[in-house]
Amino acid sequence: MYDTSDLKKGLKIEIDREPFIITDFQFSKPGKGQAMYRCKIKNLISGSTSDKTYRSGDKINKPDLMDHTMSYSYYDGENFVFMNDETFEQIEISEDLLGNNQYYLVEDMPCSILFHNDKVIEISLPNFVEKVITETEPGFKGDTSTNTYKPAKIDNGYEIHVPLFINEGDTVRIDTRTGDYADRVSKA
Amino acid sequence: MTSEKPNSLTASKKGLEFRSETLHCIRNYFHDRDFLEVETPIRVPTPALELHIDAEPSGAGFLRTSPELHMKRLLSAGYKNIFQIGPCFRKGEKGHLHHPEYTMLEWYECPGNYMSILEQTKSFLLHLCRQIHSSTSLHYQGHNIEFDSDWPEYSVCQLFHTHAGWDPSTEFDQDHFDEDLVTIIEPLLPKDQPVILKDFPAALAAMSALHPNNKKIAQRWELYLGGIEIANAYSELWDAEEQRQRMEHWSAQRLTQGRESYAVDNDFINCLNGELEAGGIALGIDRLVMIFMNATSLDELIAFREDV
């Protein structure tokens, strides 16, 4: 259990068995009144935000959160299978939960997987991933400008946007947090 | 001095300069008006008992949460106009407007009452503004606070009645009161003038006298500058029996809430015997400096915010 003196921005707490993160925190106390700990909180599963006020003496549940590094193994046609490198335990994660992250996975990629009460709630990929461009309009030779973009597909068919000078067969680096092209790693 | 802050120094140079100048002006103001500057114990056997203020233990006693009890013992000993500037400690109060160790200005006037203290406060802050800003007003976060004006005075109970839909003088509920004060009432207060919230419900009289004609309300006011609570003033309760009863009640309530309680300070209670009419005020220097320098956090003017 946490008490109110533990509350701060970034702390993860549990309310009604759901995990939340405190995104904003303000201590307020009228001179002769009670201390109030006014928090803006974000549900770690649904992403919805709300306000919550605690008072001195309140106890706040600590969420049972565990972070494990697991490697991506394979797609079984329905789910993505990850393996714990130490215990070799395997888990399946659905397409829904992975969202756009599913397009950036490469075999053996180490991912940080957050569990709440043994249930996966968040998957964090390495910040950058390298992918080969499999389909795009031919580039213009000599055009090295990086502010004009064109559509391009990566090996799994997912479409990203790349600068004009990128060609099929080039390997590029993608920022997995934003889905944006970062730079070219090697030419075809 | 570089722009970087070495040695985990929190405040800006501007902050420390404003603090120094403010303290200098405050002292001059009160000395020029024949107030006696006093210093009373910082480590005390028992703190000023209040329902929602927690004291830090120190040795066999506590660090003071306010100098109030000793200041009143001086009044009882015959001192008339006294002031003190010094540190106070309140456990757990930490935020952009709170620091567990802060500097308080208290002054008392005898004879006096909460309205004579208000007149002095108007004259004092106008003087301070003229000294520091060479003007009768100052800019704070997009608002111009004019000190040379009729400061609006609002009755706390009336404000609650109008905006929160209930009257705290007839049906007091602390949880409800604090939350409505912070979320409904305070945001409504004008920010272009100093604002007085006065006549608190008797349940929040603390150490102030009740109105002789209406025992449901207390002779207590609070000053807001730019929407921020700055000072708290009383017509001092000078009735040993009533003060003892209030403190014993808070002590019992603290225990009910599972919180540490403190002994009633008998030396203080005993000084309240006899006839005496006094007014007093406690004003947070840190917040005052913050507003005078147009800062939004105490970080700007507390040299080192030690996390202990």
Image (cartoon, coloured by chain):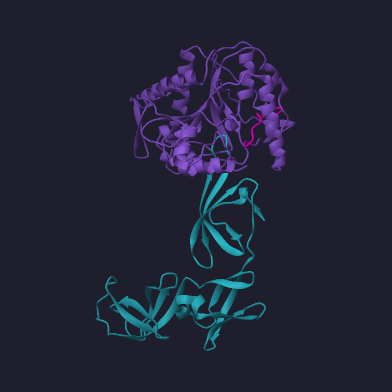
Q: Residue at x 28, y 78 (%)?
A: A164
Name the spot of residue A84 as percent of width and height, x first.
Answer: 62, 78
- Residue B284 visible, this orientation: no
Residue at the limit of the structure toward the bottom, as seen here: A77
Front residue of this view, candidates A105 and B207: B207
- Please provide percent x and percent y for residue B297: 47, 41
Q: Is residue B261 left or right of residue B81?
A: right
| Rendered view: A19 above or below B5 | below
In depth, the one of A134 and A8 nearer the eye is A8
Q: Position of residue A89 (x, y in %)?
A: 65, 80
Query: For residue B10: magenta?
Result: no
Percent across and percent down for residue B102 are 56, 33
Q: Magenta stretch mostly in which secondary structure?
A: loop
Where residue A184 sits, quadrant-wise, is: bottom left
The magenta segment is B44-53
> How many numbered markers are drawn?
0
Nearest to the observer: residue B237 or residue B66 = B237
Residue sitting nearer the eye, B225 or B219: B219
Quarter of the image where the C terminus of chain A is located: bottom left
Question: Quadrant of the image for the N terminus of chain A?
Answer: bottom right
Chain ID for purple? B
Q: Is residue B130 left or right of residue B215?
A: left
Q: Residue furthest right?
A: B60
Rendered shade, chain A: cyan
A140 vs B281: above or below: below
Is residue A24 visible in the rendered structure shown here?
A: yes
The residue drawn where x is 71% and y is 41% is: B256
